[in-house]
Image (cartoon, rainbow, N blue to C red):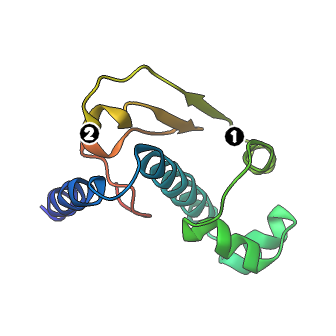
Amino acid sequence: ERIIMITDISNELQDLFAQYLKDSDILAATALAKISATITKKRVALNMNQTAFAKHMGVSQSMVSKWESGNYNFTIETIAEICSKLRCGFDIEIKDHKSDYKSLCDYHISWGEITTHGLNDNHSVLPFAS
């Protein structure tokens, strides 16, 4: 029930923000949230706090915090480096979209075993949600 409520709220917020944001802003924010959530999930799966994870990754704890914040603007090179150190891969697929807004989220980013899709398919982008 809780995830359904989060999804309902997410869809309502997405519709509200769609009036004020460009489609590219929404796509970028969604992708950043998914990448950040995946990094957080990987860290937690390794049973590490941010400090231990930073040491494992060869970066500062503040960098891990930035990665997990959802506001860090990753480059493809940075994502590739993170994947290499975590021994996982990533895939970016760009699909054609229909003219309506909701279909603009018809792309996915997959990372190792974790596959995420656009906001409109009832998947949460919050860290630790399943």
User: Mark 1: which amino acid?
Assistant: Cys
* Residue at 45 percent of width and 45 percent of height: 27
* Residue at 65 percent of width and 64 percent of height: 72
Label 2: which residue?
A: 121
Q: Is residue 13 above or below residue 93?
A: below
Callout 1: 10 Å neighbours few (<14), some, many (20+)? few
Q: Nearer the viewer, residue 18 or 127?
A: 18
Q: Is residue 58 above or below residue 100?
A: below
Classify residue 89 as left or right of residue 27.
right
Classify residue 124 as left or right of residue 22.
left
Label 1: which residue?
A: 88
Quote the CA–CA distance across marks 1 and 2.
24 Å
User: Mark 2: which amino acid?
Assistant: Asp
Callout 2: 10 Å neighbours few (<14), some, many (20+)? some
Q: Quadrant of residue 92?
A: top right
Q: Is residue 109 above or below residue 85?
A: above
* Residue at 73 percent of width and 70 percent of height: 53
* Residue at 17 percent of width and 58 percent of height: 12
Residue 87 at x, y percent in the picture: 75, 43
